[in-house]
Amino acid sequence: MEGELESRKRNSLLYDDVAEVLITEEQIQQRIRELGAAITRDFAREEILIIAVLKGALLFLADLMRNIDLPLAVDFLAVSSYGAGTESSGVVRILKDLDDPIEDRHVLIVEDIVDSGRTLDYLLRMLRQRRPATLHVCTLLDKRERREIEVPIDYIGFEVPDAFVVGYGLDYAEYYRQLPFIGVLKPEIYE
Ligand code: IMP
Ligand code: MG
């Protein structure tokens, strides 16, 4: 992987900011096939409603849904819990609510990363009040060491260490979402 990264760095402004690749594109795609198969099996022909949390879950959603063999609909929630920095403000704001009611539906929340757990805790409370038939959670990344609030997670792609990660949908100050892997930026980028 380091070889591929090195060769892309020579031609890319963006890749040059990456200090280390934690999870490769191939590892992500392989894990998503496994998650899609597990979800397909577990929901056993039920129709599901995927609620993707914008913007970080964008790429994960696109790949995951192509690996789920069930009738499904997609709706979006946009939330904000971070400013331009790397620390949570602890305050969750709903920037865009769902288009449709979720009452009596089998809901699967798709998240990019669970860090302190504050965002997911807030969303679970909010969505439970709307009386879905079932409510499950699938996150690509779990930064478990940083958890402040216990939250139930049904499907986890990868556990990641306590470092600020970017790529595959995750941003730093809105940049780096298009990187196809999960990586860590060079320290000077965060200064
Ligand atoms: P929590 O509320 O602390 O669990 O944080 C959840 C949200 O913070 C995620 O949905 C991400 O948008 C963002 N976030 C947390 N850790 C990272 C990271 O390492 N890189 C990029 N975004 C992160
Ligand atoms: Mg984010």
Image (cartoon, rainbow, N blue to C red):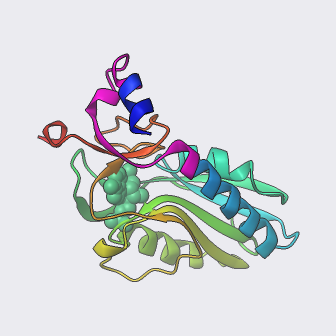
Tell me: residue 172, above or below residue 139: above
9 falls in the magenta region: yes
Residue that appears at 29% across and 28% down: 16
Residue 46: image quadrant is bottom right
User: In the image shown, does 114 or 130 lie closer to the viewer?
Assistant: 114
Tell me: residue 105, above or below residue 16: below
Q: Which residues are magenta?
A: 8-27
Rendered location of residue 47, percent (x, y): 83, 65
Residue that appears at 40% across and 23% down: 7
- Answer with left or right where residue 124 lies relative to residue 105: left
Residue that appears at 13% across and 38% down: 188
Using the rendered image of the protein, determine whether residue 127 is visible from the camera's viewpoint.
Answer: yes
- Answer with left or right where residue 189 lies relative to residue 68: left
User: In the image shown, does 91 or 84 lie closer to the viewer?
Assistant: 84
Rendered location of residue 106, percent (x, y): 74, 72
Residue 2: image quadrant is top left
User: In the image shown, does 121 or 148 lie closer to the viewer?
Assistant: 148
The quadrant of the picture showing ligand 1 is: bottom left
